[in-house]
Image (cartoon, coloured by chain):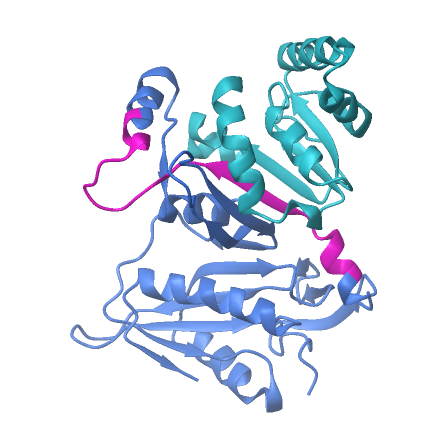
């Protein structure tokens, strides 16, 4: 999904005005590929990457590894403007943001489960 | 006549629970939006990458699927969201659409089994100038022994509650009742009443969209007000 996302992320970023938001939560955001592109293209935006613990772990590894690479300013910038939050979206999601993204997640679930969401 | 006057026949008082005087711009900025970024299944028998993924979802998940635009409307409306914009992909490398939705309306059918109605006429009587339409509908409902069909709640109704005669406090809502014609071959009736009308022209459009959807579901032939 991460490699799929990187090919879509910049066209998604140009399809919609994400600069209208202060904070965007990516629910089920995985490694944060989409969010990192959105933050890069919208300097005033902050992000919250929200996913299950194992996905957040993998996101941390990816961005911390990349940020030790002197060439990757993007990952450093991403970590400075994005909070990484573990959780289960069927139980609760981070409150207080003005944009909530849910990408390639709805298709995995039945209507009845989603109504509880 | 103020829009938010309590329902004349069944309630006694209205009570303000929140001060509505907020700066509009600020409110817009703080109103959260939901963006669903996903494939949308096109209508018709055309090749589409999502059809393959749909079959994968069938195999791998419990009732997961690629949804059509209609299915997204149904899903979001049943969870209290209104779709405000759908942006389809414009370049060939990306198949994902963006669906923008805002929380704000809840459609609650009284029963999961919907009645079969015969080319109904919808009569509207919401509180407004003079209160005449609403009084007429509130008279017709018990007179025709009409059945409660659906309640529509919206954040665009004024932030007040209605205390019904039995002492129960309820949120402002619009309600549609239905009444079967006394003999076959005649048109059944849908009766739209409510405690309030939306507070802004934008939300009036969103609300009427929902009411028209409900009317279309029952093959409504005519609107009267």
Q: Residue at x 76, y 59 (%)?
A: B27
Q: Quadrant of the C terminus of chain B?
A: bottom left
Total numbered badges shown on the rendered structure: 0
Q: In which quadrant of the rendered view does residue A22 lie?
A: top right
Look at the image and tell me whether residue B30 can be seen.
Answer: yes
Q: Is residue B214 left or right of residue A8?
A: left
Q: In the rendering, what colour is chain A?
A: cyan
Stretch of the chain drawn in magenta:
B26-52
Q: Nearer the viewer, residue B93 or B190?
A: B93
Q: Nearer the viewer, residue A66 or B159?
A: A66
Q: Position of residue B49 (x, y in %)?
A: 31, 31
Would you say residue B127 sits in the magenta stretch?
no
Taking the view exactly as shown, the residue that stands out farthest to the front is A71
Q: Quadrant of the N terminus of chain B?
A: bottom right
Q: Position of residue B201 (x, y in %)?
A: 60, 74
Taking the view exactly as shown, the residue that stands out farthest to the left is B185
Q: Residue at x 16, y 75 (%)?
A: B185
Q: Is residue B85 left or right of residue B147?
A: right
Look at the image and tell me whether residue B80 can be seen.
Answer: no
Q: In which quadrant of the rendered view does residue B105 lie?
A: bottom right
Q: Is residue B140 left or right of residue A55?
A: left
Would you say residue B31 sits in the magenta stretch?
yes
Q: Residue at x 68, y 48 (%)?
A: B32
Q: Nearer the viewer, residue B83 or A17?
A: A17
Quick check: B65 above or below B137?
A: above
Q: Position of residue B11 (x, y in %)?
A: 66, 71
Q: Which chain is blue?
A: B
Q: Is residue B68 left or right of residue B4?
A: left
Q: Residue at x 72, y 18 (%)?
A: A72
Quick check: A108 above or below B142?
A: above
């Amino acid at each position: 999904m991460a490699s799929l996302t990187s090919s879509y992320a910049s066209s998604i970023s140009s399809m919609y005005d994400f600069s209208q938001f202060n904070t965007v939560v990516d629910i089920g955001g995985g490694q944060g590929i989409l969010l990192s592109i959105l933050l890069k293209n919208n300097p005033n935006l902050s992000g919250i990457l929200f996913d299950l613990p194992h996905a957040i772990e993998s996101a941390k590894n990816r961005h911390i590894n990349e940020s030790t690479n002197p060439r990757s300013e993007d990952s450093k910038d991403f970590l400075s403007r994005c909070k990484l939050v573990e959780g289960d979206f069927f139980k609760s999601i981070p409150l207080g943001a003005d944009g909530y993204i849910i990408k390639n997640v709805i298709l995995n679930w039945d209507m009845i489960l989603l109504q509880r969401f | 006549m103020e829009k938010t006057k309590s329902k004349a026949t069944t309630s006694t008082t209205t009570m303000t629970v929140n001060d509505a005087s907020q700066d509009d711009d600020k409110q817009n900025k703080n109103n959260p939006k939901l963006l669903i970024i996903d494939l949308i299944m096109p209508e018709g028998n055309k090749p589409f990458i999502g059809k393959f993924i749909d079959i994968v979802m069938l195999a791998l998940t419990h009732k997961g699927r690629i949804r059509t635009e209609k299915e997204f409307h149904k899903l979001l409306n049943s969870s209290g969201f209104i779709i405000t914009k759908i942006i389809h992909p414009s370049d060939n490398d990306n198949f994902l659409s963006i669906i923008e939705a805002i929380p704000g309306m809840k459609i609650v059918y009284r029963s999961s089994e919907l009645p079969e109605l015969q080319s109904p006429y919808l009569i509207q009587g919401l509180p407004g100038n003079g209160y005449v339409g609403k009084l007429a509908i509130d008279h017709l409902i018990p007179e025709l022994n009409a059945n409660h069909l659906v309640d529509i709640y919206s954040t665009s109704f004024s932030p007040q509650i209605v205390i019904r005669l039995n002492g129960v406090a309820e949120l402002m809502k619009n309600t549609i009742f239905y009444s079967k014609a006394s003999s076959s071959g005649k048109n059944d009736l849908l009766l739209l009443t409510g405690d309030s009308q939306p507070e802004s022209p934008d939300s009036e459009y969103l609300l009427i969209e929902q009411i028209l959807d409900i009317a279309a579901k029952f093959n409504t032939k005519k609107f009267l007000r």
